[in-house]
Image (cartoon, rainbow, N blue to C red):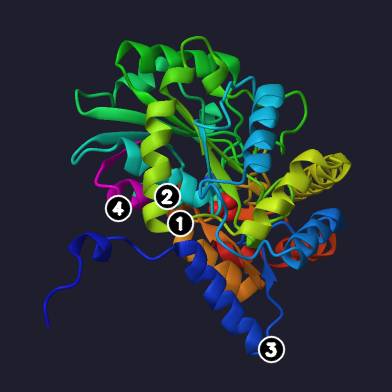
Amino acid sequence: MKDISHLVRSIPASVTLAVNDKAKALQQAGQDIIALAGGDPDFPTPPHIVEAAFQAIQKGATHYPAPMKGIMPLLEAIAVKMEQENHLHCDPRTDIVVTPGGKWAIYLALAALINPGDEIIYLEPVWVSYPPMIKLAGGQPVAVSLSAADNYRITEELLLTKVTPFTKAIMLNTPSNPTGRVLTWEELKAITKVAIEHDLYIISDEIYEKLVFDDHKHISIGSLPAMGERTLTINGLSKAYAMTGWRLGWLAGPTPIMKVAARMNSQTVSSAATFTMHAAVAALQGPQDFVEEMRLSYLVRRDFMVKALNEIEGIACQNVEGAFYLFPSFPGSKKDSLGLAEALLDHVGIAGTPGIAFGSSGEGHVRFSIATAMGDLERAVERLAQSAHKLMDA
Ligand SMILES: Cc1ncc(COP(=O)(O)O)c(C=O)c1O
């Protein structure tokens, strides 16, 4: 048989999925595993959104949408949302493509920009899917390693260490999965300076924008002066509206890039699901109070977990500024993050994602999701308090 694709073969399997699979297998075998490895809100999708989908299906929104890149009411609702909340000016007719999930919007952005060998810079610890997506789109992933000790701060100097004549774009994720960092105005200004001076695009993944805590503020980099023309913004409903299974995201940016992105979307996935688009209009235009209620729940969970984890000997957990993950380290243990995640699963009954999945600067950490019922978080803390010593040996 002839060889299958070398490129696709070089893409590693998702460590997150591997942990989830092992956790599920243990659960099926009767073990009580507390699942903190996923990134799926534990809240149901709000009923008025579900109702809008039912109605759309009943009215026959079960065929291809027109236009394929998004029904006009949704493109308009997204444009209004981006103008009002993000200060991004998008023409709904030309500058937005609705995608099946934010993830495809990220790939679309990369595919629309990359020529073979182009380098794409990202900040590490990085969400697991960025490096494989860059490779699949024909680019070279280039990591800027950020340090926990400096609260994962990005500076102009750090960025410049990785900029070369081949750099095409910088990928950002704010608030960040897994570190919870929310990029500040100063950091965004520094990134902007590098992007303008070196003629780079920005791919800005803002999927966690609604989940920001304390005094931190989400700022869309595309709204900074002169950045609209070089920024592609990704967003979607998965996290803020508890709609991961609906697969609804979007990419927005300068018209010439969006033109090719729309072409690529239609030649690959065709479109997002039509009735999901109708539900998305209801999500964006309907009441927003539950978004805030969910945020407040995550805030209570964050406060509880950060305090409780720091009270356990051998574990250190930085406060997080946004998103719904904690990224503690285990200074009391000699294990690497894979060893830690394995021991957590086998000896403590907790599934977490090993930090190495987020790049080498995630080593020594494990990511816990707090998109998990408070009762489970309390049980997790109890178990850790009793059994953390089992993680601490070499
Ligand atoms: C940083 C980041 N971007 C994008 C996504 C994709 O979300 P979606 O479910 O909309 O594809 C995720 C999901 O986990 C994520 O963590």
CA–CA distance in space, label 4 to label 2: 16 Å
| Dots 1, 2 in contact, CB < 8 A | yes
Q: Secondary structure at mark 1?
A: loop
Q: Amino acid at mark 4?
A: Leu
The first of marks 1 and 3 along the sequence is 3
Q: Position of residue 1 (x, y in %)?
A: 12, 83
Q: Which residue is mark 3?
A: 30
CA–CA distance in space, label 1 to label 2: 6 Å
CA–CA distance in space, label 3 to label 4: 39 Å
Q: Residue at x 61, y 61 (%)?
A: 38
Q: Please give left or right for residue 288 compared with residue 137 in the image.
A: right
Circle nearer the viewer, 4 or 1: 1
Q: Which residue is mark 4?
A: 136
Dot 2 surroundings within 10 Å: few (below 14), some, or many (20 or more)?
Answer: many
Q: Which residue is mark 2?
A: 265
For the question of whether residue 228 can be seen, the reply is yes
| Dots 4, 2 in contact, CB < 8 A | no
Q: Is residue 200 above or below residue 330?
A: above
Q: Residue at x 67, y 59 (%)?
A: 275
Q: Position of residue 157 (x, y in %)?
A: 37, 16
Q: Residue at x 66, y 26 (%)?
A: 218
CA–CA distance in space, label 1 to label 3: 42 Å
